[in-house]
Image: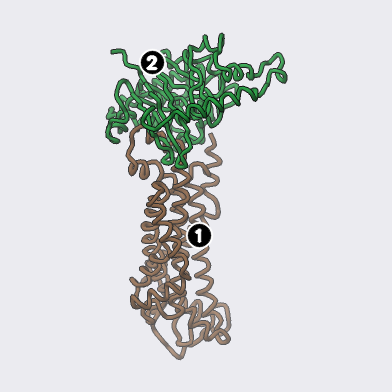
Chain colours: A green, B brown
Amino acid sequence: MSAACLDIRSLSAVLPNGQRVLRSVSLSVQPGEVRALVGESGAGKTMIGKAVLGVLPTSVRVVDGDMLLEGEDLGALQPKARRNLIGARTALIPQDPLTALNPSRRIGPQMTDRLVRILGWSGERADSRIRQLLDEVQIRDPERVLKSYPHELSGGMRQRVLIAAAFAAEPRLIVADEPTTALDVTVQKQILRLIAQLQRDHGTAILFVTHDLGVVAKISQKVSVLYAGKVVEEADTAELFAAPRHPYTRALIAATPRYTDPYASLKPVDETVLAGLAAEIAAADQSWRPGHG
Amino acid sequence: MDDARISRSGSSPRLWLAGGWLLLALLAAVLAPLIAPQDPLAQDLMLERLPPFWLDGAEPGYWLGTDSLGRDLLSRLIFGGRIAFIVAFAAASAACVVGSALGLIAGYFGGWADRIISRIVDIWMAFPPVLFAILLVAVLGTGLSSVIIAIAVIDWTRFCRVIRAEAMGQARMDYVESARIAGYGRIGIMLREVLPNVLPSIVALLSLEMGIAVIVEAILSFVNLSISTDDPTWGGIIAEGRLSIHQAWWVLVFPLITLILTVLSFSQFGEALKARFDPVLR
């Protein structure tokens, strides 16, 4: 009965022109676990996150595969029931804290609103809950923050607010979509530490989308490496860094810049690796038929 | 933290000058029967073409002079303001409600709704607006309600285009996606999340449109297609003043100044209000 928190089984999605953006992606996130999803821009990391949360762009069509949220098959549910399930059990920590808060509403109502209107909490309960969460993300002057408009807060503050909001309803799964990419390097570290802290305290499973292997090493227990919409390697994080099996993973790890020798360590992915990947993907596409796999 | 800056931009001279003129003109229009020095329709050929008060030959009580039928110009301007403001508020509000609603739907929902609404707007805007207005009033018959309907029917597209573009931009924002994930319905998101963010633009456009409605009403009066010719309207006075420009320039100049000040005030007032309401701009 230990159902995975999230179980994606051979998920495939295509664009209107027939181009595949997800190639039979399978991955699972166990309760309380952090699963990193790494890959370069355009590899489909964000797409997987959006698919799980039910907000794929209308142009992207899921043609194959299943997604199970705590054992419930999202594809088998009516749209309304699916929305309710996703709304109650998941949350998003978005990439860009500048656009993720409604600019014309104050932070307080914006945070409590979802608890009250969607989950039916009382106003006082929602209010004390978000104060507690603001404290957990180390916001020292909650009064001011709750009364502020988003533009009156710094990027780091806004991301803290968004993290607090994501954890407020005690979701089982949080999709964190490059939550530190839009922030200053110094702020990135604090935010990452906060997410890790809250994740441990609340026991929430996280699907952590990132392109930064350094972040992967710090926060996740499991990793899936994505290339062109295909999972090329999946492993325990420690194992992946100790002994990467796929040549692409090896190349990615090798390409991570090091302080000791920044220029020499900054290597592009080798051509033969890319050629191998292209062949691998072509072979996968050859054998793939929608509905079989 | 920046309260000082907010209050400074909130009390900009532009807001107060434009608002002050509009308030003055509106009060004068509302209280016209009480404050107009003369009956705006009373003709007196003994008093024809009296100059304004600072020129030789002026009569006390006829501050801005009289027209070629001896009617008091100031009183006619004050009473003309009634029609100008009624048309401005009614026509602009109607155009605003219809245009903003359609623009919000087109911009937020996109897809078919957007395609249909945008095509209608394109077709609509291919008609020259003033000719369209003249045509509409000719078909509907002259009268206050026809003028209001004509302006609303023509000018809803202004709101529709701008609000569509703004709603589209907002719909792409992450906060809208977050609201989707949280489980809000589409219409709820449109009204609760997107609408407040396009509201400053709606307010600015509404004020601008009131100015435009005043102009269109004046144009229709000028070509004698507004309301009955007896009631004074700014456009009607301008039309009469044009005929006697060499004998009595003031009959043309004062209504023009009134018209320009009012239209300018509406547009400036709208811009200043937008700056004040928009949490990001201020």
User: Which residue in the protein does label 1 denote?
Assistant: B267
For the image shown, how many numbered marks are present on the structure?
2
Q: CA gap, disc 2 to disc 1?
A: 59 Å
Q: Position of residue A65 (x, y in %)?
A: 37, 28
Crowdedness near tag 2: few (<14), some (14–19) or many (≥20) residues, C-alpha within 10 Å:
some
- Which chain is mark 1 on? B
Q: Secondary structure at mark 1?
A: helix
Relative to residue B253, is residue B164 depicted above or below?
Answer: above
User: Which residue in the protein does label 2 denote?
Assistant: A30
Crowdedness near tag 1: few (<14), some (14–19) or many (≥20) residues, C-alpha within 10 Å:
many
Q: Residue at x 45, y 80 (%)?
A: B223
Q: Position of residue B36 (x, y in %)?
A: 41, 73
Q: Nearer the viewer, residue A116 or B252?
A: A116
Q: Position of residue B61 (x, y in %)?
A: 46, 78
Q: Secondary structure at mark 2?
A: loop
Whether residue A60 can be seen here: yes
Q: Residue furthest bottom?
A: B46
Q: Amino acid at mark 2?
A: Gln
Left or right: residue A200 versus residue A152 is left
Q: Residue at x 33, y 23 (%)?
A: A69
